[in-house]
Image (cartoon, grey):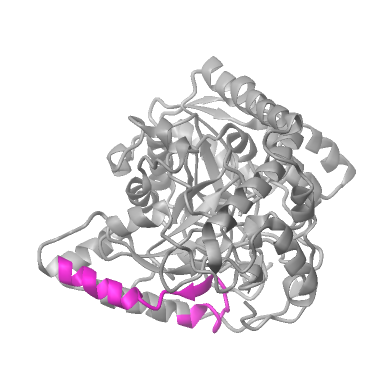
């Protein structure tokens, strides 16, 4: 998904009362990332059904450790857990609050769970996720009875020829692939005024805290499903903000790893320079468990070679409730000043970290995205065309469309269903680009890396001897508006996106019941440190709250 501009230029916009439109949002960072009964809409979503009685759900807010202990003790089987989560999806997805977080469930999920139960009875435990039901963002390929479509009607019915590397790792660890989560179509890289969480297949995903608010994108369905206990954990993907922004808006933990820590093979791409999958869960520990199960060197993804000796299969070993003690944390002060209520939450978070023994360096300069935003967007346009065409070619005969050009033509021919609210301006811009040998592409790639990484995060963190930098993951969720599109204003993911560096987002409180997260941002391969800091913050604050599925915001 695409992040808002995060630089000093935005101060002028605030003074003049200007709204950040989606074009400016793209320039500041870029990306993230079914007619199931479309709601009527004339700008904002209509009122929905009363909230469900979530308290009756046995697995509400339950942790992976509790699920594993329960299976080990015989309290539950994997089959029973899978059945309960499938029933939860049935109750919340298109009924009740109609969250529209899940595009499809795996028809073989119960059979897979039964097989894993049989293995357990025989004394075989595959790994830390044995028997755990997990949802995948619908740009992560599975070779089974489910489709992989990036939410687009153009790929409806497409079956991937093989599992993605990530799915292979999850299966090896014992996970039950429960289904595919909704997302912003094409991971929010389709239109300059799209609504995050909307896809042609799934239509508009809803924020479980306040249903007429946006879940943010593009891993919107993954965040919503995790927040609403529709799965044990979920997998999202990020190019810039697509994990951490919906994690913030939906009150969950999101981990965007260093590019190369986790393979991208057989994932529907935006940019090989910036794309990465990552876990989304209700606690830092849960996210850390899943992260370790996903790592591994993949010969088909050259970026993973750099993770040799730097990756871990167990990130829980780094979790420390006293992890803030002595840590040097820089404050991205230039990103403050957009929303006083968000600033207040960040100031409280900084004060808490100082109380817990952290050394606060304030301010610490976050690279000005106005300096590299155009270059980053240019890189993504080039790489989207090249990478998507390569992905579609690999699908072979099962691909309903064979190229980006055919996707554009498909949408134009079926505009009433594929483009009822917004167009495909970004797809057209990408299609107009040449090959990756173009000097314009090479120059843009070098510029983005130089400014965001070499002269930006690397320099700031080295000069100040920082363990991490912090900034707001996002602001309170805005009203979903299918006509006018998104209203991004706040974020801190763009520099790490361009630099290919990791982020951990953790809940930092709420504003009128709408969750807001804080990003812990580090240099390459610093996931152990970021998880330690995020865990210590989480344990000290306990800001995570279960959603209430309010139809609209309760204002005093």
Residue 346 drawn in magenta: no
Residue 96 drawn in magenta: yes
Image coords of residue 384 (percent x, y):
66, 48
Query: In screen coordinates, is 331 left or right of 165?
Result: right
Q: Residue at x 44, y 47 (%)?
A: 541
Task: Say above or below: 216 vs 115.
Answer: above
Residue found farthest to the left: 122
Residue 35 or 357: which is nearer the viewer?
A: 35
Query: In screen coordinates, is 138 left or right of 474?
Result: left
Q: Residue at x 40, y 51 (%)?
A: 165
Q: Residue at x 68, y 45 (%)?
A: 30
**Would you say residue 420 is visible in this rendering?**
no
Query: In screen coordinates, is 378 left or right of 136?
Result: right
Residue found farthest to the top: 463
Quadrant in the picture for residue 54: bottom left
Task: Say above or below: 176 vs 31.
Answer: below
Residue 109 or 461: which is nearer the viewer?
A: 109
Image coords of residue 112 (percent x, y):
29, 72
Residue found farthest to the front: 397
Magenta-colored span:
90-119
Image coords of residue 300 (percent x, y):
44, 43
Residue found farthest to the right: 16
Quadrant containing the C terminus is bottom right
Residue 277 or 328: which is nearer the viewer?
A: 277
**Would you say residue 411 is visible in this rendering?**
yes
Image coords of residue 505 (percent x, y):
51, 46
Quadrant in the picture for residue 128: bottom left
Query: In screen coordinates, is 489 left or right of 144?
Result: right
Quadrant in the picture for residue 366: top right
Residue 424 or 301: which is nearer the viewer?
A: 301
Q: Residue at x 81, y 68 (%)?
A: 483
Task: Say above or below: 404 vs 43.
Answer: above
């Amino acid at each position: 998904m695409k992040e808002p501009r995060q630089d000093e230029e935005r101060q002028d916009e605030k003074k003049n009362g200007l709204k950040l439109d989606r074009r400016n949002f793209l320039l500041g960072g870029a990306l993230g990332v079914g007619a199931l009964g479309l709601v009527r809409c004339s700008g904002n979503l209509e009122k929905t059904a009363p909230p469900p009685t979530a308290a009756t759900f046995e697995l509400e807010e339950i942790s992976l450790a509790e699920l594993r202990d329960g299976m080990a003790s015989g309290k539950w089987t994997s089959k029973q857990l899978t059945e309960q989560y499938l029933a939860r999806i049935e109750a919340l997805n298109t009924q009740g609050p109609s969250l529209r977080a899940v595009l499809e469930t795996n028809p073989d999920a119960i059979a897979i769970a039964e097989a894993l139960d049989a293995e357990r009875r025989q004394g075989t435990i595959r790994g830390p996720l044995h028997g755990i039901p997990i949802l995948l963002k619908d740009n992560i390929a599975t070779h089974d009875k489910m489709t992989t479509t990036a939410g687009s009607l153009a790929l409806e019915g497409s079956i991937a020829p093989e599992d993605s590397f990530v799915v292979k790792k999850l299966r090896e660890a014992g996970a039950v692939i429960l289904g595919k989560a909704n997302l912003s179509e094409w991971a929010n890289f389709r239109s300059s005024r799209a609504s995050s969480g909307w896809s042609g297949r799934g239509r508009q995903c809803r924020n479980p805290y306040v249903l007429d608010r946006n879940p943010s994108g593009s891993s919107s369905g993954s965040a919503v499903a995790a927040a609403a206990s529709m799965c044990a954990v979920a997998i999202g993907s990020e190019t810039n903000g697509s994990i951490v922004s919906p994690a913030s808006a939906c009150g969950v933990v999101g981990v965007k790893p260093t590019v190369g820590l986790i393979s991208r093979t057989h994932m529907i791409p935006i940019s090989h320079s910036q794309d990465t999958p990552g876990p989304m869960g209700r606690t830092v520990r849960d996210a850390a468990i899943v992260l370790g199960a996903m790592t591994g060197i993949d010969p088909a993804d050259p970026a993973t070679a750099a993770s040799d000796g730097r990756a871990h299969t167990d990130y829980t070993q780094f979790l420390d409730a006293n992890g803030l003690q002595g840590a040097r944390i820089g404050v991205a002060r230039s990103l403050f000043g957009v929303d006083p209520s968000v600033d207040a939450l960040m100031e409280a978070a900084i004060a808490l970290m100082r109380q817990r023994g952290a050394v606060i360096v304030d301010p610490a300069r976050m690279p000005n995205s106005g300096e590299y935003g155009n270059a980053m967007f240019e890189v993504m346009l080039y790489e989207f065309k090249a990478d998507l065409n390569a992905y579609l070619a690999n699908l072979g005969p099962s691909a309903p469309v064979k190229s980006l050009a055919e996707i554009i033509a498909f949408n134009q021919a079926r505009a009433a269903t594929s483009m009822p609210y917004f167009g495909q301006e970004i797809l057209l811009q990408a299609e107009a680009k040449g090959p990756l040998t173009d000097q314009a592409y090479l120059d843009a790639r070098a510029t983005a890396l130089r400014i965001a990484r070499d002269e930006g995060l690397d320099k700031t963190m080295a000069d100040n001897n920082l363990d991490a930098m912090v900034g707001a993951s996002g602001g309170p969720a805005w009203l979903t508006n299918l006509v006018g599109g998104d209203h991004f204003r706040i974020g801190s993911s763009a520099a790490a996106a361009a630099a290919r560096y990791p982020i951990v987002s953790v809940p930092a409180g709420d504003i009128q019941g709408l969750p807001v997260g804080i990003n812990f941002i580090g240099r390459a391969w610093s996931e152990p440190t970021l998880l330690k800091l995020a865990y210590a913050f989480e344990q000290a604050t306990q800001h995570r709250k279960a959603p209430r599925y309010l139809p609209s915001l309760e204002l005093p």
